[in-house]
Image: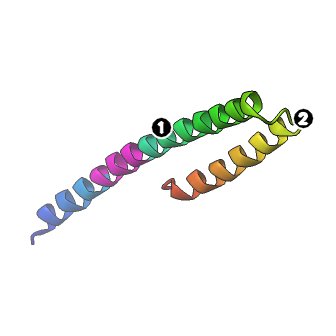
Amino acid sequence: MSAISTAVWSNTCKVCDVIYKSVHNTIVQMQRSRQLSANRQIMYHLDISFMRDQDLPFHLDQMNDATNKQYDLKLIK
């Protein structure tokens, strides 16, 4: 490869990497928000169904913390 084609290839790869990272992180953030919403719905249905537990908000926070840690690992820095 010539120097020009190498430079163009290198810059193109950087652009593709930036686009890939932004699309990937957007999808991961969408998945995270859907999971957090599902966590909230699960706790709501548990509260209505049979558990009138005072600690449900605490358990929801723990579930959300675990979810956030899991999805933080999936993000590309």
Q: How is the image coloured?
A: rainbow
Dominant secondary-structure state across the stretch colored magenta: helix
Q: Residue furthest front?
A: 50
Q: Amino acid at mark 1?
A: Met
Q: Mark 2, residues whose alpha carbon is within 10 Å: few (<14), some, or many (≥20)?
A: few
Seen from the viewer's position, the closer of residues 45 and 15 is 45
Residue 35: quadrant of the picture: top right
Q: Are marks 1 and 2 in contact (CB under 8 Å)?
A: no
Specify which label sits upstream in the sequence, 1 or 2: 1
Q: CA distance from mark 1 to mark 2?
A: 30 Å
The range drawn in magenta is 15-24
Q: Amino acid at mark 2?
A: Gln
Q: Is residue 9 above or below residue 32?
A: below
Q: Residue furthest bottom?
A: 1
Q: Is residue 55 above or below residue 72?
A: above
Q: Is residue 49 above or below residue 13?
A: above
Q: Mark 1, residues whose alpha carbon is within 10 Å: few (<14), some, or many (≥20)?
A: few
Residue 52: quadrant of the picture: top right
Residue 28 location in percent, x, y?
47, 46
- For the residues carrying marks 1 and 2, which lies nearer the camera in this image? 2
Residue displayed at 22% across by 54% down: 12
Q: Which mark is residue 30?
A: 1
Residue 9 location in percent, x, y?
19, 60
Residue displayed at 47% across by 37% down: 30
Q: Which mark is residue 42?
A: none
Tell me if 60 is positioned left or right of 52 in this view.
Answer: left
Report the quarter where the N terminus lies: bottom left
Name the residue tied to disc 2: 54
Give SS at disc 1.
helix
Residue displayed at 36% across by 49% down: 18
Tell me if 61 is positioned left or right of 25 in this view.
Answer: right
Tell me if 67 is positioned left or right of 53 in this view.
Answer: left
